[in-house]
Amino acid sequence: MPESPVRELRELVTGLSAWLRYQRRLGLKALPGEVPARPKEETGREEPIPTLAEIRQEMGKCRRCKLYAGATHLVFGDGNPAAALMFIGEAPGAEEDLQGLPFVGAAGQLLNNLLNKLGLRRDQVYITNVVKSRPPGNREPEADEIEACLPFLLKQIKAVRPRVIVTLGRVATQALLGTREPLTRLRGRWQRHDHIRVMPTFHPSYLLRFPKERHKTWGDMQQVMEYLASQEEDWGYVSLIV
Ligand code: URA
């Protein structure tokens, strides 16, 4: 017999709840074998929401716009499929096109540094782009290319169900929010997509060219981290890893 069964039980419960909080913080939304609750559609019926793997499968060898002709890989997305924090960039560059992964070139290195400074690892967040195939010569994606790819981004958001989306640069911000407002007016101010908070900020490529602006993105990310932390407090969670 344990010395004090009550004390032993209390220690077990404390340990288990700390572990669950830690897993939640890492993005776990359900335990293995448990189906995460999905929002009901307006009909009141539960609509199946495709998983990231299903969305990727649906994209297939995409030829929905002209970009496929010059692309090596379709760059779908990377990271935690149930992340609380999602980053959306513009389109793959040369290095991303070669590796088939988003933000693995110079801009990606800066994004990684930012995440590290925030106490986050890349595999804790989800990273994708508005357009999944590389535009030639790294030009901006054109309206028809964005239009062809946007439905898949919207499905990815539904699958991941992040609490916050950070849009990196003007193209991602305007595409997601469906606005022509300049980034200078949107950056650093909370916006919404569906019921999800959106924080527009500078693109890492811009920050590579204008390092003096980095403190602004840092400030934007502080707002994001404060909001995520406040959410945890609302649910009675204690931050264990930041
Ligand atoms: N720039 C982007 O917008 N996305 C990438 O994946 C890389 C660079």
Image (spheres, rainbow, N blue to C red):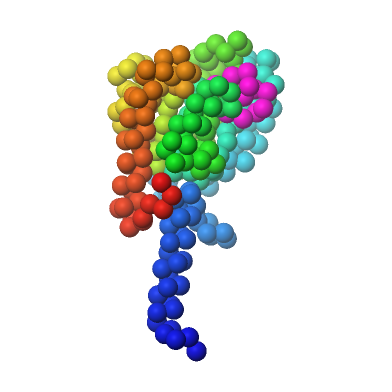
Asked if residue 93 lies in the magenta stretch, the reply is yes
Image label count:
0
Q: Is residue 81 above or below residue 109?
A: below
Find the magenta span and give its range: 91-102
Q: Where is residue 196 in the image (x, y as percent from the top left)?
A: 37, 38
Residue at 53% in and 38% down: 122
Left or right placement of residue 7 versus residue 151 in this view:
left
Q: Where is residue 238 in the image (x, y as percent from the top left)?
A: 36, 55
Q: Where is residue 202 in the image (x, y as percent from the top left)?
A: 40, 22
Q: Is residue 182 above or below residue 51?
A: above
Asked if residue 56 lies in the magenta stretch, the reply is no
Location of residue 104 by image quarter = top right
Residue at 51% in and 13% down: 140
Residue at 33% in and 57% down: 236
Q: Is residue 151 above or below residue 94?
A: below
Location of residue 7 by image quarter = bottom left
Residue 172 visible at all:
no
Residue 167 visible at all:
yes
Of 136 and 151, which appears nearest the observer? 136
Farthest bottom residue? 1
Q: Where is residue 45 in the image (x, y as percent from the top left)?
A: 45, 51
Of 117 and 93, which appears nearest the observer? 117
Left or right placement of residue 68 versus residue 215 in this view:
right
Of 7 and 48, which appears nearest the observer? 7
Residue at 32% in and 30% down: 219
